[in-house]
Image (cartoon, rainbow, N blue to C red):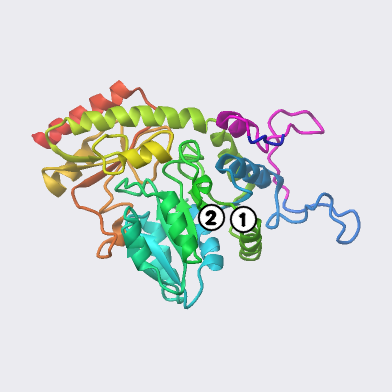
Amino acid sequence: MTTASTQGFATTAIHAGQDHDPTTGAVIPPVHFSTTYQQDGIANLRNGWEYGRSGNPTRTALEIQLAALEGGTSALSFASGLAAEDALLRVVGRPGGHAVVGHDLYGGTYRLISRLWGPWGLDHTVADATDPDAVRAAIRDETSLIWVETPSNPLLSVVDIAALADIAHDAGALLVVDNTFASPALQRPLGLGADVVVHSVTKYLGGHSDVLGGALVFADPELDERVRFIQFAAGGVSGPLDAWLATRGIKTLDVRMRRHSENAQQVAEHLQAADAVSRVYYPGLPDHPGHALAARQMSGFGGMLSVSFEGGEPAARRFSESLRLFTLAESLGGVESLVNYPWDMTHASVRGTALEVPKNLVRVSVGLESVTDLIADIDQALTVVRS
Ligand SMILES: *Cc1c(COP(=O)(O)O)cnc(C)c1O
C-alpha cells in the first residue's frame, strides 16, 4: 500500500510497505529468508531481486515504512545503529575533512568518529549543540557535516534542528540528526531541515529489546544512492528476521511513545520532588532549559530521563543498584524499564573526553509498566539511598 502524505502517523506505521502477500493473501507479509533469486535469463532479474546483500523484500518493506514515518524520500536498514553511522560517514566524511559534533552524544557514536574516523583523517570539533552560535563558530572551510542528537544522550539536551540546518546549509555542510531518543512518532527532523536521520532501531523503533538494527533516512535521493552503494559494497545490511521484528515493533510505535511519555513525565515529576535528588533532566519539565523548544519541535517529550543525586557518585550507584522493577542494563526504548549508570556503563568510553558525563548521573528508560509500580520502586530505592 502506498502512503498518502495526508495519512495519520499511526496509520502509516501500520500500513506503509506492508502489502498483503499477492500469492496467498497473507495479511502479514512473509519473511523472505532466501539469499538468492532465480533469474529469468542471464542477468534478467525478476523485479530486480538478485542477492540478499543487494536487496531483500523484508528489508525493503522496513525501509519503505521508515521513509514514510520520517517523511524522507528513502531509507536504508543496517545491522546496527553504528553500522548505519559508519556507512554514512564514508560518504559525508572524508580524510582531510571536518565534522562538528554535539557535546552530548551516544558514547559509541563519539568513539566511532574520534577513534575510528579520526586516525583515518576526519577531524572533528565538539560544540555545545544547544547553542547555535557555538556550532557556527566551530565550522571550518572543510566542515562537511554537523552531527547532533536531540534529545541527547544522556543529558537530554534539546537542540534547535531548524537553526542548525540553516547553519549547516550556509556552510555547505549537511545536518545529521540522530532521532533515536524521540523516534519519528514525536519528532521528524527532515521536516525541520535536517538532511539525514540516523536511528538505532534497537531502541524505540524495535521497541522490545529483542532486535539489533540501524537505519538512515534521507531527504535527498542522490545521497541515498551514494550510501546505498556503500551498504551494498561493504555489506552492513540487516538480516530478514531482524528487519521483520523491527517492522512489527514499529506498528505500535505511536501508542508506545505516548505511553512512554506519560509514564516518564510522572516519574520525572516524582523524582524532582524527592529530597535526595539534585536535578532531573527531562524536557517535559517546565524548568528544563530546552522545554519551550521541545514543546515546539516535538509532539511529546519521550521516555528517557536522567537524574543526578545530592549524595554524588555513591548515591547514584546505590540508587541504580537498588531498583528492582527497573532492570540495571544498558540500552533503552523497550517496553520494560531500565536503569543505567552512564559513567561506568554506556558512556565509559567517553571518560576523559569533552563528552565525559557527571559521576552522580543515572539514566532511566521509562517503560510501559503501570506507573504506580514504577513510582513505588523508585521510592523504595530512594529509601535505600537515604539510609
Ligand atoms: C544505541 C544508540 C546508537 C547505536 O546503535 P546500535 O544499534 O547499538 O549500534 C546510536 N545512537 C543512539 C542515540 C543510541 O542510543
Residue 253 seen anywhere in this rendered image of the structure: yes
Q: Position of residue 35 (x, y in %)?
A: 72, 52
Please determine whether, in this image, residue 103 is positioned above or below residue 184: below
Q: Residue at x 65, y 47 (%)?
A: 59
Q: Position of residue 72 (x, y in %)?
A: 60, 47
In which quadrant of the rendered view does residue 243 lie? top right
Tag 2 near tag 1, CB within 8 Å: yes
Which comes sooner in the sequence, label 2 or label 1? 2
Looking at this view, is 304 or 197 the one in front? Answer: 197
Q: Which residue is mark 1?
A: 220
Please determine whether, in this image, residue 156 is positioned above or below residue 207: below
Q: Residue at x 26, y 40 (%)?
A: 288
**Range covered by the magenta-colored residues:** 6-34
Q: Position of residue 7 (x, y in %)?
A: 62, 30
SS label for mark 2? loop
Residue 241 seen anywhere in this rendered image of the structure: no
| Side (left or right) of 332 relative to 382 | right
Q: Which residue is mark 2?
A: 195
| Side (left or right) of 327 relative to 210 | left
C-alpha span from label 2 to label 1: 7 Å
